[in-house]
Amino acid sequence: MDRFLLNRRRVLAGLAAGIALPAIVTSARAAQPIDAAGDFGLDGNDQSDQSAKLQAALDAAAKEGRMLLLPGAGFEVSKIEIPNGVHVLGIHGHTILTTPGDARLAHIADANGITIEGVVFQANAPESAAGVNGLIEIEGSSDVTFRQCGFYNSAANGIAATGSSLTIEDCDFEGFAAAAIHSQNGTGLMIRGNAIRKGSNAGIRIWRDDPGQDGSIVSGNRISKIDWADGGNGQNGNGVSIYKADGVIVSDNVIDGCAFSAVRVNSGKNTQIRGNSCTNSGEVAIFSEFAFSGSVIADNVIDGAATGISITNLDSGGHLATCTGNIVRNITPSSKTNPDTRPVGIYAEADTVVAKNAVDAVPGAGIVAGYGPFVRNVIVSDNVVTGSMIGIGVSVVQEKSPGPVRVSGNIISGAQQAIVGMEWEKIVSGDLSKDAGRYPNVTVSDNSVS
């Protein structure tokens, strides 16, 4: 039996047993949960709108500080206001709240201490839900938890939160026009152990209006089949998208089949992207771009992408990163979603250490430091590059006084050209280990080529 599949008898028995403990429960009535079916007439055989019955049950449970039990059946509801402090328990996979689609299903505002478990939220006709931001919309709330819930068939987001802190764990998301989870100006989300699939534009978005601390943790999720239905050149089509949000950790996720990136950081500071498995990405698998700073990209596995890892946009202030211990392999010759993408394993521009990575099977360059004059303080050391057309490429354009680049201690095997100097996309030195003296900012030493 599923250990999370709680039924009403088990809950009632467990709570009733606690009546003998006066320090925990002061009365038999306070110990008993509210039964939405028996106490408020919520009826699984009633096909009419039951919003009023559910709202009354929620309000009573919150007022009396009692758990609310929902039966294992389907109910048509909409515009539900979930009150402060309520704890709702459904029958996992069987309690289904459905909205006809022309209104949000539920709303939480200026609340805290809410827990919802084992409830499915879905829309029947999402194409009619113009202006609806999510199946569940949350504003200015804290300590809100969704556990083992389902979110299906949304006209926009599954969960849309603004200025809130949430825990979303062991939930299932499928069929959403925007993102499964969208946080705007969040105050720290814990998003873990969820299954997210078949999204039209994004899996998880951690976004802010202005740069600032967010502190969300996205860990242990499975994200797959994320499209880019609304187009663009990177704002859509990502498994995890971080925009202007600082201090976000993205770790130990399995992310497959995103039209653009598995993980994309745009202008975020102090982001950690660690231990993720990123497969079949349509553009750059892991992207740290624009005004980012302080990105840690470590111990990820990338198999299949148009570019493996890109740490870029020195011209927009993007700088300061470590890229270590990653495996990057099976880079494709081109990108169907962004034709400008070049087949590169790892790319870096400014104040970045690229070290101890393994790069294999790239029909371009395994590792590249800089583009044109956009290169400064890049170390490429102790990497293993195998089966790539070019092992390592370094921009040697001398405009605008480019900063230092050091290429040392790398092992390159099976490349047509090992270490090359490039002016934009043109190779001007086929053997930079011999020609480095021509470029005062470049040091090449102690590399092994076979």
Image (cartoon, grey):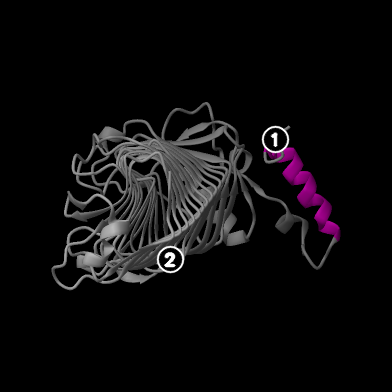
User: Which amino acid, mark 2?
Assistant: Asp
Q: CA distance from mark 2 to mark 1?
A: 34 Å
Along the line of sight, the residue nearer the viewer: 431 or 364: 431
**In percent of the image, x 64 and y 56: which residue is there?**
66
Name the mark on residue 110.
2
**In percent of the image, x 21 and y 54: which residue is there?**
422
Q: Residue 273 at what x, y percent from top left?
A: 46, 56
Q: Is residue 48 above or below residue 300?
A: above
Mark 2 Cα-neighbour bin, 10 Å: few <14, some 14–19, many ≥20: few
User: Which amino acid, mark 1?
Assistant: Asp
- Tell me which label, 2 or 1, sits earlier in the chain: 1
Mark 1, secondary structure of its residue: loop
Q: Is residue 337 above or below residue 253?
A: above
**In percent of the image, x 26 and y 33: which residue is there?**
127
Q: Is residue 300 left or right of residue 440?
A: right
Along the line of sight, the residue nearer the viewer: 227 or 312: 312
Name the mark on residue 2.
1
